Amino acid sequence: MSISSSGDTLHLEADVLIIGGGLAGTWAAAAARQAGASVILADKGYCGTSGVTATAGPGHWWVPPDPPELRENAIRNRQKSGFGINDPEWMARVLAKTWESLPTLHGFYDFSKDETGATRYRELRGPEYMRALRKIVDSLGVTVLDHCPALELLQRPDGSVSGARGIRRQKGGAWQVNAGAVVLATGGTSFLSRLLGSHTNTGDGYLMAAEAGAELSGMEFTNYYTVALAGTNMTRSMSYAFATYYDEDGNRLPIPPGPDIIRPLAAAMLKGKVFCDLSRTPEDIRAKVPIISPNFMLPFRRWDIDPYRDKFEVTMHGEGTVRGIGGLRIVSEDCGTSVPGLYAAGDAATRELVAGAISGGGNVNSAWAVSSGQWAGEGATRFAVRQRGRDSGRPIGQAGLRPVSQHAVDLRATLSVVQNEMLSYDKNIFRAGEKLKRSGEVLDDIWKIFRAHALGNGADVLRTRETAAMLATARWSAASALARDESRGMHQRDDRPQTDARLEHRILVGGLDKVWTSGDRSRPLELAS
């Protein structure tokens, strides 16, 4: 790695640049470094504490290899529940990679034991998990740029990505990394819905990749919501599997336990306040909650609520592409995008390959982050070694950075429009063609103004760029949902309640000034033996 500076810009060079320092980003950085690359990791926050994993108690899709029927059954069940969108070979790869990877955390993470004395690998404590991964990347010699959000990619004339530019929030000035390859591990976006841990997840990687020519997939699957104590962002969902719900008059609502509560809960909330208690929670689960999700009980204690006895008001926070499954399209077994030198991992990438048309929840998404991070880091390394000595590219950022003409654009009002179209229960949960078409038109009109005139200056540059990313993501989501003219998995259309066998394929979406969609009917990726 080399370092230089000019003016207020810090210039660095490395084989691989990782953008994002959450679960996928740290696994990617470690894999690239272990593969022999010089690695720089740039995080919007502080690597080891930022992102949704750091506030969670993540489980993993953790299935033993023996007897073989265990994984075969897990894959078969997931393929059935995924409505034909996922791929059994990718699921097998993720199960195998996760199984071999988590034990390597020994010496950095203090695993707990179950009642038989066996090590608990599946369920980890998020804060300690991320702290361990930060220690690992530091010990491997990865250069970490904390509080250094990326704003735009660099691209060579041949279309390959060659690094990125961003700002240094604490030290001031800018940074530019010239790299042989880039891994986007920037997470998804909940459109700033107050989802716990997601404040830095604003879809930045989607926008940067689209500006380079990449497309996305599965963006219609963005209507997963998580229950939380009203007035808080404590979206830890495990305990709500045992919830009993009530209306304002104390009448019990006929909402059965299980994963399909979003639509009935949303319908009830559109009529009035909804309350719940967790009295049905088994004692052994109550005992595990402080270990798995140590922050879950904090707001209840602060407000003197015993959730296992008292009724309390609840709301739902939209998860967008965090527990939704859309993201950048993956075209190779090493998580490459369609743009040379650009790789995607974790929530920045589509999780359709393993999750299908339903949420990956905590376990599948976490296993995907662990696996895709490493595959992307290794793939980026292989690409980067062939780029050594090449000239760097030029910055290619558009919306919020290089307007046609500048005039004031209200960021708060723009975000409010995005949130109204993407988080409102009546639009995003109870979908219909006319609603989706209208959302697309509203978002397109805002984009035209924003793209032409918004320019982030000084302290506003990051928020301007984040707003552009969320606006772009919303447009892709609305367009994909309109294109999937059926109901499948989490994507439910009130005007198209049936599943259409002709649409048992992925929906691709892309474009900036003009959004396009198409069906991905390609054969599954050829995987190396």
Image: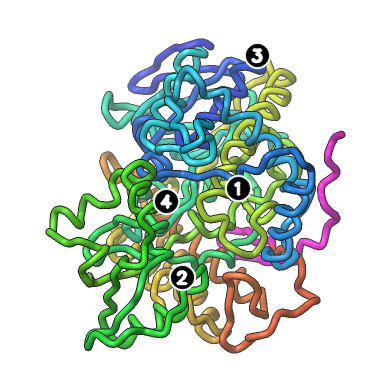
Let me know if residue 516 is in the magenta part.
Answer: yes
Name which residue lies at 45% across and 36% down.
22
On screen, 160 above or below 356?
above
Give how far across and how far down residue 57 sits, in percent: 41, 44
Specify the quadrant that holds the C terminus.
top right
Q: Nearer the viewer, mark 1 or mark 4?
A: 1
User: Earlier along the polypeptide chain: callout 3 or callout 2?
Assistant: 3
Badge 2 crowding class, 10 Å Cα cut-off, few under 14, some 14 to 19, many 20 or more, is many
- Give the residue at mark 2: 443
Q: How far is the residue under mark 3 from the one under mark 1?
A: 24 Å
User: Earlier along the polypeptide chain: callout 1 or callout 4?
Assistant: 4
As helix, strand or loop, the secondary structure at mark 1 comes to loop
Q: Coloured how?
A: rainbow
User: Earlier along the polypeptide chain: callout 1 or callout 2?
Assistant: 1
Q: Which mark is residue 157?
A: none
Let me know if residue 412 is in the magenta part.
Answer: no
As helix, strand or loop, the secondary structure at mark 3 comes to loop
